[in-house]
Image (cartoon, rainbow, N blue to C red):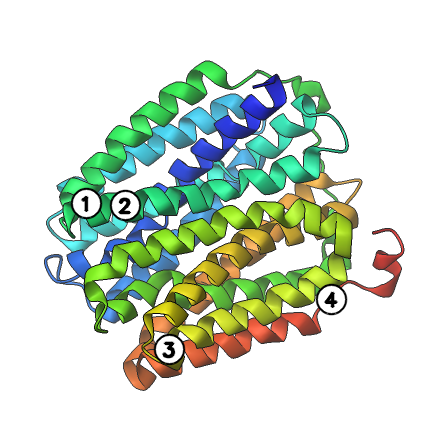
């Protein structure tokens, strides 16, 4: 394995820990711990929503508090916070402490969002950087596969599952400590000019809607399956979602073949379809297809919006990263905050139909014509 591929592999397993294992395991294990921890739908939705806010704070911290810190060290701090947050989840006997742990995990995931982008920019050959960044995001899918298999093995015993996640995270942290390179800090451009923020107003609106449209699926799709005849297979549905996420790594290649506008429209349509397919009928094959499609398109869309922002904010790449991920997280915060209340009123079918419509609206906010001339 050459140095560049080794770096991408190291990034994939780190993202598997920071996102898949640490951040998204909440939705998978929610049906198992909400009773013992005295959670209602509103409380679970609120905890998830606040974790999106801490995710934003973690993202911003890289460009403020930790702006003079090596990207490698940012990632190691993120890893230590993940381990601390996971430890709180294992020790929790009430939703308050559990919620604090989830919020810490949100902050750690935010810290892990941008440093790899800078490392790849310095260490990977120009022309292969978009593909490398797209493959990094497949770490989300890998993490989902891992946690699905772990939860299936422990048959819903969530404390054992989280303890296993801690062990795996320690191993991943050690690998990254050995393999992550130091980069030339002089090349990192943290400069921003706030006058240009709304130049990407369509990007902002689109990413907010994407965040809203995906939020209910992340938080409640497992809870929905748990109420069907297939509840014994809930963790395996999570595995299929993760397998779909691994396919999302082809976003870079799709961008080269079809262009930004086509794959942007495809993303919005597919996310809407995934939400509807989940509740259309209680057919295991259709529900599995929904999870594969959602996992693939979620990872795929992260690549799409990263490509778009990098071409909008050429002179201020840090601003492009912040705008993309902050607006995505803001949409997820809004969507998650209201999802618990919508669920109480409409039930699962109404919830996923509402969010499929919101996913569909993203296709109305496409790149400007003058932007396309440069894409």
Q: Judge left or right: residue 245 versus residue 129.
A: left
Q: Secondary structure at mark 2?
A: helix
Distance (Cα) linking label 1 and label 4 = 43 Å
For marks 2 and 4, the one nearer the N-term is 2
Q: Judge left or right: residue 93 versus residue 195.
A: left
Q: Which mark is residue 153?
A: 1
Q: Secondary structure at mark 1?
A: helix
For marks 4 and 3, the one nearer the N-term is 3
Q: Write the residue at 48% across / 22% down.
A: 73
Residue receiving disc 2: 149
Callout 1–callout 4 Cβ contact below 8 Å: no
Distance (Cα) linking label 2 and label 1 = 6 Å
Q: Quadrant of residue 167?
A: top left
Residue receiving disc 4: 366
Callout 1–callout 3 Cβ contact below 8 Å: no
The residue mark sitting in front, 2 or 4, is 2
Residue 171, x across and y down, in percent: 32, 24
């Amino acid at each position: 394995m050459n140095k560049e591929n080794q770096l991408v592999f190291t990034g994939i397993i780190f993202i598997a820990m920071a996102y898949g294992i640490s951040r998204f395991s909440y939705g998978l294990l929610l049906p198992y711990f909400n009773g013992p921890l005295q959670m209602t739908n509103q409380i679970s939705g609120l905890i998830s929503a606040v974790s999106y806010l801490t995710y934003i704070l973690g993202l911003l911290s890289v460009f403020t508090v930790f702006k003079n810190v090596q990207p490698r060290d940012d990632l190691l701090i993120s890893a230590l916070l993940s381990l601390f947050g996971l430890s709180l989840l294992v020790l929790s006997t009430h939703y308050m402490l559990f919620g604090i742990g989830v919020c810490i995990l949100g902050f750690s995931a935010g810290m892990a969002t941008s440093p790899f982008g800078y490392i790849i920019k310095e260490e990977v050959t120009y022309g292969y950087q978009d593909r490398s960044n797209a493959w990094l995001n497949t770490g989300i899918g890998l993490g989902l596969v891992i946690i699905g298999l772990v939860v299936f093995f422990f048959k819903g015993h969530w404390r054992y599952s989280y303890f296993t996640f801690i062990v795996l995270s320690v191993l991943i942290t050690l690998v990254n400590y050995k393999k992550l390179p130091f980069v030339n800090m002089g090349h990192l451009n943290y400069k921003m000019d706030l006058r240009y923020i709304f130049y990407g107003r369509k990007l902002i609106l689109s990413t907010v809607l994407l965040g809203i449209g995906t939020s209910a699926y992340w938080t409640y799709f497992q809870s929905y399956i748990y109420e069907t005849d297939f509840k014994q297979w809930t963790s395996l549905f999570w595995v299929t979602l993760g397998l779909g996420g691994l396919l999302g790594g082809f976003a870079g290649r799709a961008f080269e073949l079809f262009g930004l506008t086509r794959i942007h429209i495809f993303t919005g349509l597919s996310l809407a379809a995934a939400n509807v397919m989940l509740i259309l009928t209680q057919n295991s094959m259709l529900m599995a297809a929904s999870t594969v499609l959602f996992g693939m398109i979620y990872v795929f869309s992260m690549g799409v919006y990263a490509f778009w922002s990098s071409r909008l904010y050429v002179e201020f790449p840090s601003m492009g990263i912040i705008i993309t991920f902050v607006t995505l997280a803001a949409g997820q915060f809004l969507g998650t905050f209201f999802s618990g209340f919508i669920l109480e009123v409409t039930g699962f079918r109404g919830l996923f139909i509402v969010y499929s419509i919101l996913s569909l609206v993203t296709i109305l906010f496409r790149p400007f014509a003058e932007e396309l001339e440069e894409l």
